[in-house]
Amino acid sequence: MYFHTIKIFPLLKMIHKLARKQIVIYYADKYSVHFMIPWLSNNFKNFKPTAAIALNATRHMNQLERKKLFSPDIEKMRTAEGRWFEAIIYEMFLDISKKSDRIKFLARKGADAPKPQRLAQLGQNGIFYSKYGDIVIRGNGQDLAEFDLLLVTSDNEVAFAEVVTSPSDLKEFEQEILFKKNLLGYLYNQKTVPFLLISSFDISNYSVVKRLAKAKENAIIFTSSCEQIKKLVKHYRPRILYTKPENHAKLVLATDLGFKQPFDYRKFHEEVKSEIFARITHNGFKQNIRSSPPTDMLVKKILYGALYPKAIKAVCDTYGMSVRGKRIEFSEFSHFYSNAIIATDLPGYELIIYLRSRQKKEYLKMVQVKDGHFKYERPTPSRVGFFLWLESLQPTLGTRITISILEAFTNKETKTK
């Protein structure tokens, strides 16, 4: 193989010296394992990122991202490293899937994704590609889940992988993986969903990883660190070269992996919302009770609706809202904001209020803090599909139902005086 005009074969001896660390695989029960574990043991035991793969991975990055790989700014460098390492793992799977019959199909991503990508729109349900070539599943235009790798095994099971380069990536990781398993399990009618966790550092001692390793359909892998991989390509700076993608018999579009179950996310959302309203107004609400349909577990957030002005005043007076340390008075509300929407995240039912800014095309996400009032957390920009859903909501909630919702989900021990 050649990188345009430069041969990579003289690098093989250097690669052998610099990349001795083998990929380590953890699994729960060596006597009773999912097919994915022995497959990994056979194919990845001596398989490490090479200079060819590391260089080829840069084709999934733009010129600025490549420069940031060696930036003195640690934050920028780590961000670029994360995207690079994810592309490296994809390139590794491109290579090994040619040699293994355990992979039937591998979904295109990054530079191999189709162009142009479809922008988010209300009503979109299914698999889409983001503008960066990332694989996402959208529900009513909202990005519900992103998949670092999506593949089909020889047993016609859809599997996925998550790639991490920092312990901070493991926050709320277990809940995210469970949601993705539920989502793919429903959409492809699978009782189990094989999952790979691939890391650039040793993650074997993290409690979340130990719990994930107990499931026989999961494989936990760590490979060479980004620093070790960088040593393989440092001689190519500042001009990083890569090969053009070849024809690959197993590469398919993620969008061609047809679902086996109906997927109307707005319908699922409305069913759960109606049930919650019924329990709040008639039977009382208990947060540990969820409805039985499997689609219930696919709903990540409930948007209860936008508030009428009197309801907004009740929230300001009873609970209070503040942005960057300044309390929002109802008399000034309409000057800075045009709408307020109540929501809860699932499965924990954490309360959220979204405020539509008049100054910028964005929503301010307000989360409830310990004393009960709502505090600004971050913006929801207009470029995401969720923004479109928020924009479609007109006032429907009066004072009584608004206060009922807030009372149902506010922790009684930390409620505002």
Image (cartoon, grey):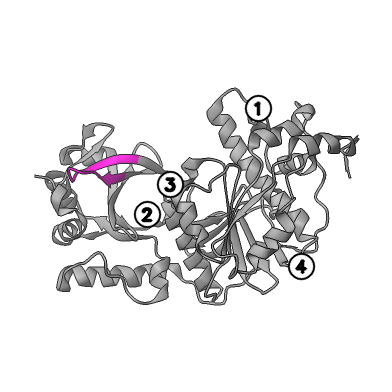
Question: In the rendered structure, are the residues bearing label 3 and label 1 in contact, judged by CB atoms less than 8 Å apart?
Answer: no
User: Tag on residue 70?
Assistant: 1
Is there any visible trace of residue 143 in the rendered image?
no
Query: Callout 4: helix, strand or loop?
Result: loop
**Separation (CA) of disc 3 from disc 1:** 26 Å
Among the two numbered marks 3 and 2 on one chain, the one whose residue lies closer to the N terminus: 3
Q: Nearer the viewer, residue 283 or 44?
A: 44
Q: Residue at x 68, y 37 (%)?
A: 62
At label 2, the amino acid type is: Leu
Q: Does residue 302 appear to the left or right of 259 in the view shown?
A: left
User: Tag on residue 101?
Assistant: 4
Question: In the rendered structure, are the residues bearing label 1 and label 4 in contact, judged by CB atoms less than 8 Å apart?
Answer: no
User: Is residue 173 positioned above or below 242 on the image?
Assistant: below
Q: How many marks?
A: 4
Among the two numbered marks 4 and 2 on one chain, the one whose residue lies closer to the N terminus: 4
Q: Does residue 107 appear to the left or right of 179 in the view shown?
A: right
Q: Residue at x 79, y 29 (%)?
A: 236
User: Tag on residue 390?
Assistant: 2
Among the two numbered marks 1 and 4 on one chain, the one whose residue lies closer to the N terminus: 1
